[in-house]
Image (cartoon, rainbow, N blue to C red):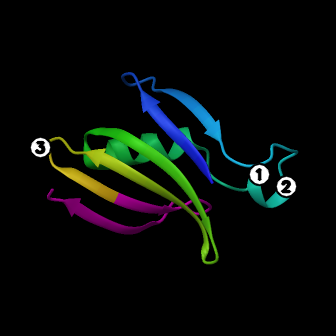
Amino acid sequence: MKHYFIAGAAGAVLALATVGTVGVATAQEQKMLSPQDVIEKLEKEFGGKVTDFELDRGLLGDIYEVEVIDRDGREWDVDVDARTGEILRKHEDRD
């Protein structure tokens, strides 16, 4: 599992911490959307800021799990297909 921690303003700085072995990316991994592309898409769509970003590699495929604060200050948990960019689920976090 890879974790992406987001910091900074519009030109977000990505600090990558990789869990597991590091090796040459497979062809399948190369077809995934970049974290920056997904962050830019969600920040534009929600009119806010991505606060957390994680790649979940599961049996059903690779999913970016993202937390976003929208323009109104509401927090959202958003699951994005890492290959197509399709939003699979979005849920307002009311904690």
Question: Residue 82 placed where, x, y %?
Answer: 58, 59
Q: In the rendered structure, which disc, 3 or 1, sits on the residue that comes first in sequence?
A: 1
In depth, the one of 40 and 64 nearer the eye is 64
Q: CA distance from mark 1 to mark 2?
A: 6 Å
Is residue 72 part of the magenta span, yes or no? no
**Amino acid under disc 2:** Thr
Is 71 on the left-hand or right-hand side of 86?
Answer: left
Is 70 on the left-hand or right-hand side of 17?
Answer: left
Q: In the rendered structure, which disc, 2 or 3, sits on the residue that comes first in sequence?
A: 2
What's drawn in magenta, residue-wise? 78-95
Q: Residues within 10 Å of mark 3 (few under 14, many from 20)?
A: few
Foreground label between 2 and 3: 2
Labels 1 and 2 touching (C-beta < 8 A)? yes
The residue singled out by tag 2 in the image is 26
> Residue 29 falls in which quadrant of the image?
bottom right
Q: Residues within 10 Å of mark 1 (few under 14, many from 20)?
A: few
Residue in the image at 55% along x and 44% along y: 3
Q: Quadrant of the C terminus?
A: bottom left
The residue singled out by tag 3 in the image is 72
Does the magenta stretch mainly form a helix, a strand or a loop? Answer: strand
Is residue 88 part of the magenta span, yes or no? yes
The residue singled out by tag 1 in the image is 30
Residue in the image at 41% along x and 52% along y: 66
Question: Residue 51 placed where, x, y %?
Answer: 35, 39
The outermost residue toward the right is 24
Residue in the image at 27% along x and 48% along y: 46
**Amino acid under disc 1:** Gln
Question: Residue 62 placed where, x, y %?
Answer: 61, 64
> Residue 32 falls in which quadrant of the image?
bottom right
Labels 2 and 3 touching (C-beta < 8 A)? no
